[in-house]
Amino acid sequence: MNNQETIEILEELLNSVKTLGFRKTLNILKVEKKKDVVEMDDYDHFVLDTITTEFAITIDDLLYGRYIRGEIKYAVGFAVYFLYENKTLGQIHKNVFKFKNKTLLSKYRQMIFDLKKSHKADEKFISLKDKLEKIIQTFKKDNQ
C-alpha cells in the first residue's frame, strides 16, 4: 500500500467518524468473533425454530445479531421467556445466548410478562404469545 492509498483510507475513516460518530464507526469496524457452537437440547431447538419462523428471521440473527431493535427484541424476549421454563437465566445466557447481555435478556423477557391487552400495540404480541404457548405445549406433550 502506498502513501496515497493510506491517506485516502484515513480520510474516509475521518469522514465516517464525522458522519456516524466515534462509537458507530468502531462498531462497524469491529471484526465479528468466531461463532462458538451453542449447546442446545431438542426443546431449545424447537423453541428457537418456532420463534424464528414466526418472526421471519434466521437463528443467526436471533443468537448472534449485534443490533436488537423492533420486533427482534420481542423475538429474543419470547425465546428467553419460553426457555426459562426449563432453565435459569444464567444457563440460558451461558449456553444459548452467549453473545447477548444477561441484563438485557432479563429485560426482554420482562417485556413479554408486561404485555397488556389494554395496550393496542401489545395485541399483536399477545396473540402471538398465545399461539406460541399452544405450539410449545403440544411439543412438550409429544416428547414426554
Image: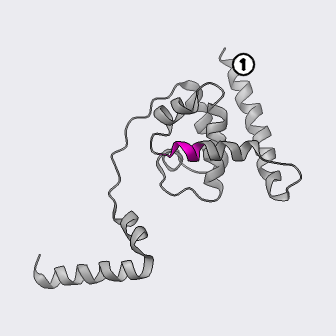
State whether residue 50 appears in this view. no
From this view, report whether residue 44 is shown above or below residue 30. above
| Residue type at tag 1 | Lys
Q: Is residue 58 in the magenta section? A: no
The residue shown at (60%, 31%) is 46
Residue 117, percent across and down? 87, 49
- Dot 1 crowding, Cα within 10 Å, few <14, some 14–19, many 20+: few
Q: Residue furthest front?
A: 103
Q: Residue furthest right?
A: 118
Residue 127, percent across and down? 81, 45
From this view, report whether residue 51 is shown above or below residue 18. above
How many labels, in total?
Answer: 1
Q: Place residue 21 in its image quadrant.
A: bottom left
The quarter of the image holding the N terminus is bottom left
The quarter of the image holding the C terminus is top right
Q: Nearer the viewer, residue 58 or 1?
A: 1
The part of the chain drawn in magenta is 100-105
The residue shown at (73%, 37%) is 132
Q: Residue furthest left?
A: 2
State whether residue 57 appears in this view. yes
Q: Is residue 70 left or right of residue 23?
A: right
Residue 3, percent across and down? 11, 82
Residue matched to label 1? 141
Disc 1 is placed on an element classified as helix
Q: Place residue 8 in its image quadrant.
A: bottom left
Residue 62, percent across and down? 54, 47
Q: What colouring style does the render use? A: one colour
The residue shown at (46%, 33%) is 94
Q: Main secondary structure of the magenta part?
A: helix
